[in-house]
Each structure stands twice: as structure tokens, then as C-alpha cells.
Image (cartoon, rainbow, N blue to C red):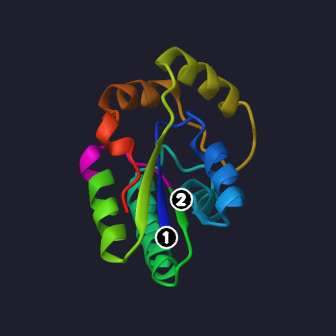
């Protein structure tokens, strides 16, 4: 049975690193929107069009994921999934396709997230440069998954 893996966590929590590990472990298709966005639009995190572009990429990636799941291939969505409602929506979609689902939550204290952010911002690559003043409200807004969300659903 194909599985939809949802990577839940804030930037710098280690989602993509874990997603790469799961990709190898389960021979799953990994879809990371930030990688596509940086390649298509560069470092646009502060651009007014960033969020609209990001939503379009996530939509395209879901279409790819949906087809892969229907074909029996497991998929990792490295979207962050900040809200329970969003996590539940994608789990319901997986169920409709006959796939199981798992939420992988990376719980990192805010001071460690900010330390990692400072380090990440110094590195070139496929990760967005995110100003610290953007990150702080995100930390407050993130909805931590409840224990029942962390259980595999078949």
C-alpha cells in the first residue's frame, strides 16, 4: 500500500533532511516546494509574489503526488503542514486514493530554530534566506500536531 508522508514543522526544524532519509528508506517520491521555487524564482522569500508562487508549486506537486499514490508509489510532501486542518485534509485525500498516511513532526525549540536559521541564512543553496523577524511570528502561529495525529492511518 502506498503511503503519504506529511512533513510537519517550521523552517529549520529538519524536515527536508528527514524527508531525504525517508525517500531512500521507502523508495518514495519526495516533493519539496522550496527546492522548486528557488530554482524557478531564486531567493524570493521577501517578494510580494512569493506566497502565490509557493501555493502554485504546492498545487502542482499535489497533482504529481496524487498520480504517484494512485499508481502505488509512496510520496513525501515536505510542505510544513502548519495547521491541523491542512494535515487532516491531505490525510483524507490519501485515504480517498487508497493510501495510508503518516505525519512526521519535528519538534525543535524556538531558540534552536533561530540558531539554525542564522546558520542556514549564511549558506548558499536551495533553502530560502528567511529574515529572523519573519520567523518569529511563524513560531507563534504553528499548530503542533496532537498525539492522535502522529499515528499511522491505513
| Residue 47 drawn at (x, y percent) | 47, 49
Residue hosting label 1: 61
Residue beneath the point at 49% across and 70% down? 61
Instruction: State whether residue 136 is above or below residue 7.
Output: above
Instruction: State whether residue 144 is above or below residue 90.
Output: above
Quick check: 17 left or right of 31?
A: right
| Residue 6 drawn at (x, y percent) | 46, 53
Q: Are marks 2 and 1 in contact (CB under 8 Å)?
A: yes
| Residue 87 drawn at (x, y percent) | 33, 52
Q: Nearer the viewer, residue 34 or 97?
A: 97
Quick check: 130 left or right of 35?
A: left
Q: Nearer the viewer, residue 131 or 12?
A: 12
The quadrant of the image that shows the C terminus is bottom left
| Residue 70 drawn at (x, y percent) | 45, 82
Q: In the image, is residue 83 part of the stretch drawn in magenta?
A: yes
Under circle 2, the secondary element is helix
Q: Nearer the viewer, residue 116 or 40?
A: 116
Instruction: State whether residue 78 is above or below residue 113.
Output: below
Q: Looking at the image, which residue sits at the far right?
A: 124
Task: For label 1, count other residues whose C-alpha is less than 10 Å away and answer few (under 14), some (14-19) or many (20+).
Answer: some
Earlier-in-chain disc, 2 versus 1: 2
**Between marks 2 and 1, how big is the CA–CA gap?**
8 Å
Residue beneath the point at 49% across and 19% down? 109
Q: In the image, is residue 54 part of the stretch drawn in magenta?
A: no
Res. 147 visible in picture: yes
Magenta stretch, residue numbers: 78-86
Q: Looking at the image, which residue sits at the far left?
A: 85
Q: Which mark is residue 33?
A: 2
Amino acid at each position: 500500500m502506498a503511503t503519504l508522508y506529511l512533513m510537519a514543522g517550521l523552517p529549520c526544524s529538519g524536515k527536508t533532511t528527514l524527508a531525504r532519509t525517508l525517500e531512500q528508506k521507502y523508495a518514495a517520491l519526495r516533493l519539496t516546494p522550496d527546492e522548486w521555487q528557488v530554482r524557478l524564482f531564486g531567493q524570493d522569500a521577501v517578494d510580494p509574489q512569493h506566497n502565490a508562487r509557493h501555493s502554485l508549486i504546492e498545487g502542482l506537486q499535489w497533482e504529481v503526488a496524487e498520480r504517484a499514490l494512485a499508481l502505488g508509489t509512496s510520496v513525501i510532501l515536505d510542505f510544513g503542514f502548519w495547521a491541523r486542518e491542512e494535515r487532516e485534509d491531505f490525510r483524507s485525500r490519501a485515504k480517498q486514493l487508497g493510501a495510508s498516511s503518516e505525519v512526521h513532526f519535528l519538534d525543535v525549540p524556538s531558540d534552536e530554530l533561530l540558531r539554525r536559521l542564522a546558520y542556514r541564512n549564511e549558506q548558499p543553496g536551495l533553502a530560502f534566506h528567511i529574515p529572523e523577524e519573519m520567523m518569529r511570528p511563524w513560531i507563534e502561529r504553528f499548530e503542533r500536531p496532537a498525539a492522535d495525529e502522529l499515528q499511522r492511518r491505513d
